[in-house]
Amino acid sequence: MKKLLGILVLGFILSNTSSATPPKHQWSPSIEKWKKIFKKVEYPPNDCKYCTERHDYWAYNTYRKASLKNRDYKNNGGLKKIIIKPAKSNSVRIIKKNTKPLPKEIYDYVYYRDISSLMVFDKGVLIHDWKRDYIFNDKPINGESRSKSIVGIAAIKMACQNILDLNKTHGEYSSEIKDSFYGHVTLKDSLNMLARDQYVINYNILTETHRKKSDLTAILNKHPKRLETEGPKEFKYSNPNTDLITLDMINVLGGKKKFAKWFQKNISEAAGFASKGKILLDKKEAPISSSSIMLTREDWLRFGMYVIELMKDKKSCEAKKLQEAFENAVPTKKKFATKYAMFFWLNGYGVEDLVQMRGHGLRLSLIDWKNDRIIQTNSFAISWKPQELVNLIWTNDS
């Protein structure tokens, strides 16, 4: 009897450690529904043995939500937005391409995991560009929290232009939240996630704003200003910090239209964006920039290339400010990135001075600026280990 029990236990352990394709999700589309959105794309096979979600479910629901965000909010319920205009044609950043198929070991790794696309940029050239059939190059992809890094660069540029003083408080720029907890928080502390708002915001603000149940200012004004802030001044990651920086920028420039014009001239032109993008807004037109800047795959890569340019630049104000911020970055107590500054994660994965842009579900831009190379992923679940992918790509190449 004991022997039989031992065999059953061993079988249970093995069955739970071996790979298995994910089960059909209750919201997985039928083939008919799939064809309405993906007219020329075959229904994905359910062969992703290390995935946590089926690709049919993820692709269908991602594009269904993207469609909702693209709607005209006045007529059919979509979210409001600021349109990001591309750079002028003569300013579009050229991506040199000499793409080759992924080596089998790398292909097997990304194909059998919750990864929808991979771009590998090396020494000025895009050498690998892999994506699943349901990913379209001309469709903007939500960067999730990768969006934050763009806001960080925008804030630095405005500081260099004497538009923003990063030592001032949010309340000095955004009167609508001056009596909230964040009214006395400086822009610099928000950029470095030092607002100490872990004692204030303890729920996901995005759920409220994306579903239009509430809006940013209403949520933040539920938490009044305090004479004394609890706890030590240390790193604590939270979304309102980024949204407030963008709100400050919109306010100081005099509204969304002027901000959009400034953004096109100072961010789109500098990064060399080739396509239109979006910054989503809540129902009261406050920005959801912490997680909802949408760019094409290639424009996300262009922004990574721009970061490399800034890190190597020794003259411009914005480059000097970014480099100085990184030199004085805040400890995070995280293994994947030991420091943080200006909405960028820093170090990690055994790469010296790595700069990371990170979004929900491991939407990553891993920027090894010293060696002029980038690994960019679009993913939808934290079910795989970036260290393994870094080892496969950069360890094998070095």
Image (cartoon, rainbow, N blue to C red):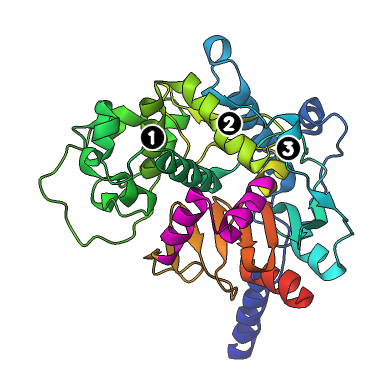
Q: In the image, which disc is placed on residue 163?
A: 1
Crowd class of label 2 (few under 14; some 14 to 19; many from 20; radius 10 Å): some
Quarter holding residue 277: top right
Residue 63's x, y, as percent?
Answer: 68, 33
Q: Amino acid at mark 1?
A: Ile
| Secondary-structure class at tag 2 | helix
Give the distance between the C-alpha atoms of the residues marked 2 and 3, in whole angstroms. Answer: 12 Å
Between the C-alphas of marks 2 and 1, the distance is 15 Å
Disc number placed over residue 335 in the picture, else none: none
Q: Quadrant of the N terminus?
A: bottom right
Is 249 one of the magenta-colored residues?
A: no
Q: Furthest residue to the bottom?
A: 3
The residue indicated by pointer 2 is 265
Region rendered in magenta: 302-327
Q: Looking at the image, which residue sits at the far left? A: 227
Q: How many marks?
A: 3
In this rendering, does residue 162 appear at all? yes
| Residue at the spot 51% in from the left edge and 48% down from the top edge | 149
Question: Looking at the rendering, in which quadrant would you find the C terminus?
Answer: bottom right
Residue wearing tag 3: 92
Amino acid carrying label 3: it is: Val
Magenta stretch prevailing secondary structure = helix
Residue 384 seen from this side: no
Q: What residue do we see at 33% from left, 60% from top?
A: 235
Residue 318 magenta-drawn? yes
Identity of the residue drawn at 72% across and 72% down:
394
